[in-house]
Image (spheres, helix red, strand yellow):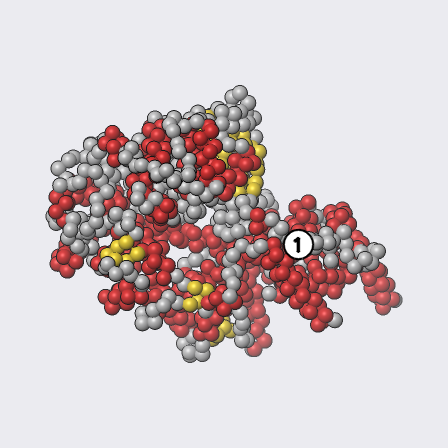
Amino acid sequence: MADKYSADTIITETQKRISNAFDVFDHESNKTVDVREIGTIIRSLGCFPSEADLHDIIAELEEEEPTGFVRYEKFLPTMTKILLERKFRPITEDLLLQAFEVLDQQKKGHLEPEELTKYLTQEGEPFTQEEMDEMLSAAVDPDKNVILYKDFVSMMTFDDTR
Amino acid sequence: SKKCYKLLHHFFFHRVLLKAMKAAVLIQRWYRQYAARMEVRRRYTWNIFQSMEYADLQDQIKLYNFLGYLMDNFTPSSTERNLISHIFRENEVCRDAEWERYFSYNNITVPDIYSGPRLTFPLDMDQAAHLVEAFKNKQQLHSRYVLQLLLETWKLLRVLPNINRVSTCHSKEITICGDLHGQLEDLLLIFYKNGMPSLEKPYVFNGDYVDRGKDSIEILLILFAFLLVFPGDVYLNRGNHEDHIINLRYGFTKEVLNKYKLHGKRILKLLQKIFSWLPLVTVIDQRVLIVHGGISDTTDLALIARVDRHRYVSALRPPKKKTPSRTNVYADSERYDEMIICKNRRGSLTFPKPFGARESFQRRSLQDFSSTVARTLGEEFEVRRRQAEFSLSSFSKSHRILSSALSSDSEPESSEFTDTGNDEWKQILDLLWSDPMSHDGCIPNEVRGGGCYWGPDVTEGFLNRHNLQLIIRSHECKQDGYEFCHNRKVLTLFSASNYYEVGSNRGAFVRLGPDLVPYFVQYQATSMTRGLSFPQNVKRTEHTALKVLREQLFVHKSDLLSAFQEIDKENTGLICLNDWASAIERVLHLDLPWRVLHPQLVSSTTDGKLDYHGWFRDLALKKPSSEHIEQTMLETLYRHRSTLETIFRIVDTDNSGLITFEDFRQTLKLLSAYLKMEISDEVINELVISTDTNNDGSIDIDEFMEAFRLVDKSRLERGKSLLKPATDTFLSIHTLIELAFGFFFFFFFF
């Protein structure tokens, strides 16, 4: 009995969270959001999907005749499943640090902006120029003009916990 | 072999993970998540500012309706003047020539020590440029020249049509700017980047030049100067803030009266006329429509071309009608149940031709009539309320009766009252107040309280009917200064950067050449934002928004407490998140994502429940200095301080900035009627005492409002203002602290 109660509560709480996140992007207050915001909404709920993951999710969410909008009724079950199954788990701080260290092949302890730009705009799921500029504005040390990735990672992680 | 496979898999996975490509994907995946969460914070910060802005605007309209309702139910039989009737007066009794005498500047002498610009008319380009330079150097134009410039502007505007028609022939590029809202720095930046208006550089300005910012009058003077010098190359549209009713609340009236203590009143009066004579829309090459707010499904340019636009001194005002209309757009009858009508006030007259009977009441004070009047009026009122039709337009009926009772002159425009008057009014209201929405259709804009929300289908229909290809409008703040919608057929353009807060948004202007392809230039006025990263910008703006929101929560404490206690029947002092959120929604009526905001507004919970008494203590805002006044009352007055201030300014008919104790008392009674809340005499006395009054029996409005501000206790305790724009030094220290903490955090874990 106690188990069922807590399971139900968890589901309700989860769905309330989803509803709230959805509402932030529901500009017309009619329970639809632009499909291009779906990625942001999913991420804002604590998930770390890749772009490829998002493509799959959106394909599932879109109507037979894509309208460019996603309705809440469709989004809710999909998102609930994602959250309850804990898909797209967070990337831990040490994993992230390792990733930066991999890119720092000369083991300098820092990265040049050009280096990082090359990797992130050419490899993997490339950043747009805008994304790259945004990240650089937060990552580049203004005095030394390099990315002290250790500090950067800690700072960003600290940010999140606030 | 399964185990082997697993090992191999793990080994390869591990190896692969360390490869640069996978590393890149990881970083990208992580950063996009971070960026998404920053985006959400930016969004709800935006929501907070916007919803509070619109809630405030709604309040203003409600206030106006309330005052209109008072007018409507004014008993014509008694000859006392209404406390606030003067703001509804059109003053059309005088001809333009007589008005020109009233606005005459000839007897204003300019002292030798005045070092500002001395204008000679007709103006030329050098003088206009000199004026810009002078304002850049923080000089103020002398009131003589202000009046002269405004008079010339008024004369010119009177011959302009409702619809400006512009052409890009001769390869001229036209520059279009959106809302400026008194932010001179932005206008200067635009001129710096784009050049000043000239024969080769035509400009269209799309309204909302005034209010909120602190240099509204300077912006107007610059725009009008260029209009006079280049009448064929400068085009001004009217915005919804070019409206004296709105100006009373949003700062323009206050600014002018502070800068021009002697002649401010006349300047404001002249500006009222000028605003009403501003053209309504501009059309470029018969292809592009430029209008401040937008359109509706009934917008008809042919009709708009024909209206007498100057009759609509305030777009919030319906036309005069013979028969009161049954359409009721705004009035809310239930609010006005128990009303105390304040009658008769003393004060200087603002019109050159005093109404006969009024003069004899000049020296009487409100209190002479209040007791008897209230009683008889109250009864009379009840009867009327049951009979009356609560529509804005019916007030003008009694207005006519009132003015004919008080004046021997008849109004010249009393003749043609038709039903098309109502249509015309709606046309203008829609042009100045509407907003686009993403869904088809056209619905009343309840958020703002005026105009419509119109959909892509309405845009399509409108463009086809009028053979146009693009609508450029302003009215809404956009983070990047501009934004397309409706399949790129509607462009919103906003030219006031950092509108909500330093770093909140960029401004933009657009250039159109003969190909009518828009070319955008974006900017941000303050150097404080240079060097701020996107996350830092977001956080700073968010901080301000949350502070404002916390204030709102604090001033609704009593209502919130009741709501919480209703839920917490066992009086545990604890409440869960969901209940907290629903209670706030019910009390505040602000459409915000409270559950998303929860972590920012609530610092700690025990077992997922909030100790709400402790929470209120944490909100920790220092109250105004009156301990004897009950919390609820203070909250109410603080919450409605904008309304209170607006009423003060209305009551202060001679614009002296001072009102008598008696009028102060009556103002509070007006407010209590508006809020349907008792404000006792004891409270009023207490308020009066707590303000530092000049010992001549009058209260300084500004001082009173100042003493009434809430102070952020936490800010006081930390001894520094968090709202001050950070210098670069401050930022690096801030970052250093964060980094240091980050280091500590990092080392602590490893």
Position of B341 relative to B615 (above/below)? above
Crowding near pointer 1: few (<14 within 10 Å), some, many (20+)? some
> In screen coordinates, is B10 left or right of B74?
right
Question: Residue drawn at (54%, 36%), measured in percent from left and top?
Answer: B192
Give residue A124's position: percent from left, percent from top.
Answer: 75, 50
Give residue A24's position: percent from left, percent from top.
Answer: 53, 55
Amino acid type at mark 1: Ala
Q: Nearer the viewer, residue B135 or A77?
A: B135
Subunit ID for the residue under disc 1? A
Question: Residue drawn at (61%, 61%), measured in percent from left and top?
Answer: B734
Position of B50 relative to B198 (above/below)? below
Give residue B532's position: percent from left, percent from top.
Answer: 61, 52
Position of A88 relative to B182 (above/below)? below
Q: Which residue is mark 1?
A: A138
Q: Nearer the viewer, residue A141 or B41?
A: A141
Give residue B601's position: percent from left, percent from top.
Answer: 51, 65
Q: Residue furthest front?
A: B112
Q: Nearer the viewer, residue B200 or B703?
A: B703
Position of B508 relative to B155 (above/below)? below
Question: Residue drawn at (43%, 54%), measured in percent from left and top?
Answer: B52
